[in-house]
Amino acid sequence: MNKKILVTGGAGYIGTHTCIALHAAGYDIVVYDNLSNSSREAINRVSILIGQPIDFIEGDIRDAESLRQAFVDHRFFGVIHFAGLKAVGESVTKPLLYYNNNVSGTITLLEVMRQYNVKNLIFSSSATVYGDPKFLPIDESSSRSCTNPYGQSKLTVEHILEDLAVSDESWNLIPLRYFNPVGAHPSGQIGEDPNDIPNNLMPYISQVAVGKLPKLSIFGNDYPTIDGTGVRDFIHVTDLAQGHVAALDYLKQQTSIEEHGSDEKSSDKKNSIGFLPINLGTGKGTSVLELVAAFSKVSEQNIPYHFVSRRAGDIASCYASADKAKDMLKWRAKLSITDMCQDTWRWQSMNPNGYDGSI
């Protein structure tokens, strides 16, 4: 059976870790990335970690001709689609850029996939599609709304995928709704390498710990939470990567049943997946101050911080119900907050300047 996967945005933070997990699971990978928010060095390091060169195409998902050439050169079983801009603050100031890249780019990708009859897609969605949740933990049936253009771009793509599944039952579409990915590969050779000032909490903490930034700004200390700071569901990026492998394995299993008709019920169904959203999270909430304390303990570094005003659109608490992933994908997050902090600190200590430096 064909096990070749196109990984768009595969040079990025989650993409690189997923490439390692895919290779370990026996999949053949082709990475497609424009390197606008990633590094060729990341691909080089993945190649070293897996012991073979990565088949890499430098291209933009909005470039239909470049994408078509990739599909001409390779026979893909499916696509894992990470490529997209992801800074919430930047999306507020540059909404057209985000809709053009994240939404229009995905439409271009889907059109090329349809042209070459590759209709298996795992999409990098986000818990931001849930907006301010009405109940916790958040399950996949929760209502969806967004407070910024980044989240809205993810939700718009989900609506497109839903409509596509209704229009053509041969599509198999799994949007994975991530909660808060953190951590790094245990080797310390790949990790999160944000441009300029980090947008996410963990890389900001680690850059303060390593002395690259003076102190951490904590947005709000008056939320109705255990210590007044925001509570989030942090998930180790290697657990998240395994979630993509589990989703791909599930998709292959279901499409195999569909093709071969192992029983009457399955052979009667034209499509066994359609649009299938699944949360990837731990199901546990950790506050900002709890994460700071855990990182300080692991790194044995003081983490100076101060409180500033809440950010517009931020919510008090957000954590997942991961029951659907456990039941359908046989997947669950295994690594602890301590593991997340240890691996982040190893990456940051070995690479204080990210991929710009050398190990």
Image (cartoon, grey):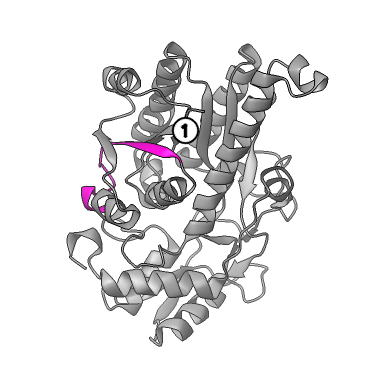
Q: x, y (%) of residue 81?
A: 44, 35
Q: Is residue 158 left or right of residue 273?
A: left
* Image quadrant assignment for residue 159: top right
Choose top left, top right, bottom left or bottom right for residue 45: bottom left
Which residue is nearer to you in this view: 247 or 280? 247
Q: Is residue 29 magenta?
A: yes
| Image height of 98 relative to 177, above or below | above
Q: Is residue 95 left or right of residue 152?
A: left
Point out residue 211 in the picture as x, y percentages from the top left corner.
27, 78
Q: Say which of 91 and 204 sits in front.
A: 204
Q: Position of residue 106 (x, y in %)?
A: 43, 26
Residue at 43%, 66% in the rendered image: 202
Locate residue 328, reporting x and y percent. 71, 42
Q: Which residues are magenta?
A: 27-42
Considering every residue shown, the one lying at the far left of the view is 357
Residue type highlighted by circle 1: Lys
- Left/right placement of residue 33 relative to residue 243 reads left
Is 220 rendered above or below residue 92?
Answer: below
- Secondary structure under tag 1 reads loop
Q: Which residue is depicted at the point 59% across and 45% down?
A: 246
Whether residue 274 is visible, yes or no, is: no
Identify which residue, 202 or 145, lies in the foreground: 202
Asked whether residue 98 appears in the rendered view, the answer is yes
What residue is pinned by disc 1?
3
Q: Is residue 127 magenta?
A: no
Mark 1 neighbour density, 10 Å: few (under 14) some (14–19) many (20 or more): some
